[in-house]
Image: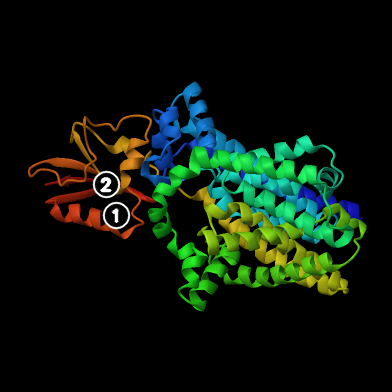
Amino acid sequence: MLQQSAQRAKFLMWLVVAALLIAGFLRFLQQPTFWLDEAFIAVSLKNPTLQTIFARLEYGQYFPRLYLLMLAAVREIFGYRIGVLRLLPFLFFVIGTWLWAKLLWKRAEGVFVVGLVSAALLLGATYWLDQAVQLKQYTFDVTLAVLPFLLGDEFYETAFAEGKNQKRLLLLALPCALSYTYPLSLGARFAGWYLQRGRRSGWRLRPSAFFRFAAAMALALVAIYVTDLRFNFQDRTAYLAYWNDCLLQAQLQQGVGKTARLLSKFLWRWHGRMPLVTAVLVPLQIIGVYGVIKRWKATDANAEEKRWGSRSVGSLVLLIGVMAASALLNYPICAGRVLLFTQVHIQLLTLEGALFLWALIKSQKARAIVFALLIGILLFHAGREYLRFVRAEPAENLKPVLPLIEAAVSDTIWVHPCSVAQVRALPDALPAPVVMLDGKIPASGTTVWILWTHLGDKHCQQALAEIKQKSRRWQVLHEGDGQGLALAEF
């Protein structure tokens, strides 16, 4: 009976995986034009060279250069098309979703209702779904970051304590040259294993294994510094200004209230402003942290704990480490795409809380009531957000706008200053011979197409309001989710 229940929960988990992949694939087939953050990267792939890739990127973007080189290679083979540039990010979304689900299921396996909780949490990972086809590094980062946690404790025991299979450690360290976040994940996994192993079996490691691993990591980190980070530091001032509200170091200087608000964003804003979901998840995560620490303090482990091992300790170390990185090194920690690699670990601590609560409640009736409410709330909100994504128009998509532009009506297109990168990133030229990218007001007596995207920033709204005020006649032909077109006379 228990085996059948576990299989049903597993079926639901893989059904959720299929739902996420289908939604991502449908968005990939739509091939919407690049939104602003993607366009900043896409312009570097228009005519890529080794000199432009391994240098300061246009618009001051932070992007792993070796991954950018992979994207450039695909672009050189298949051409500069929207689907081509998004191919690798989408493939990593597919792989990352599968690995994410595999890790959650490994923690929940054997307990039917906890399996349902894990499926609901994955379905509710809307930030992850948003990145399904985005030309950014986040699907790549998440895929890499999950790998050290999929390896069981026996891998680390064999390599570090017994000194066997040390070549595998070199392979494990190499991705540090490819990703900003992978070193944090790998370091946390090793630290979690070592903390648990040291308490139960002793702290001694094979020096040769540890130093080879440390040397490989150091070389990989030197590689990412040489190819990447040294150029990023040139834009550090702008970076700090942009992420100021998400930097723990800055918020600590603002007082307890600002600090607490940022930490709550980091831990509990993954599902948006949903008080009911937050009210369910926060107690589970607190219980989960307590359960992880309690299990770590124990001197022995049962068969179930041995199967899962020290992964949850590593998750706790990672979350603490990311907060420390924000306090000391100005790493942004607002919930969102930059921290996607941590979301699975917050979910793992939630599952730890669910498992602890399941074992704590002895009454079958009480268990049924508590977990039915918990799963019902999570599935309702996750399902609603999933359907919202499927039905929504891609943000800042210029595809519905471009067919409305007729050169016979006007041969000039004025592009909003905040939209220049998105227009530059288009595979094909705009359907008019004259394109104004300088933001200047058109000459008096002219009729001009006004094209805009991305009005999220106040100065972008002001720029559109200014040109509208300067016009004699203003006719809006299209206005969608983050994009619009007007015909204006001056």
Residue at the outermost left position: 445
Element assignment for label 2? loop
Give the number of marks.
2
| Quadrant into which the N terminus falls | bottom right
Rendered view: 165 above or below 36: above
Q: Earlier in the sequence, mark 1 or mark 2?
A: 2
Task: Quickly name the residue at label 2.
Answer: 416
Task: Quickly name the residue at label 1.
Answer: 460
Residue at horizontal 18%, vertical 50%? 474
Q: Please, what is the three-letter code of the amino acid marked with disc 1?
A: Cys
Quick one: 486 or 167, which is closer to the camera? Answer: 167
Element assignment for label 1? helix
How many residues crowd mark 2 within 10 Å: few (<14), some (14–19), many (20+)? Answer: many
How many residues crowd mark 1 within 10 Å: few (<14), some (14–19), many (20+)? Answer: some
Q: Is residue 81 visible?
A: yes
Q: How is the image coloured?
A: rainbow
Residue at horizontal 80%, vertical 70%? 357
Q: Please, what is the three-letter code of the amino acid marked with disc 2?
A: His
* Marks 1 and 2, how far apart at CA: 8 Å
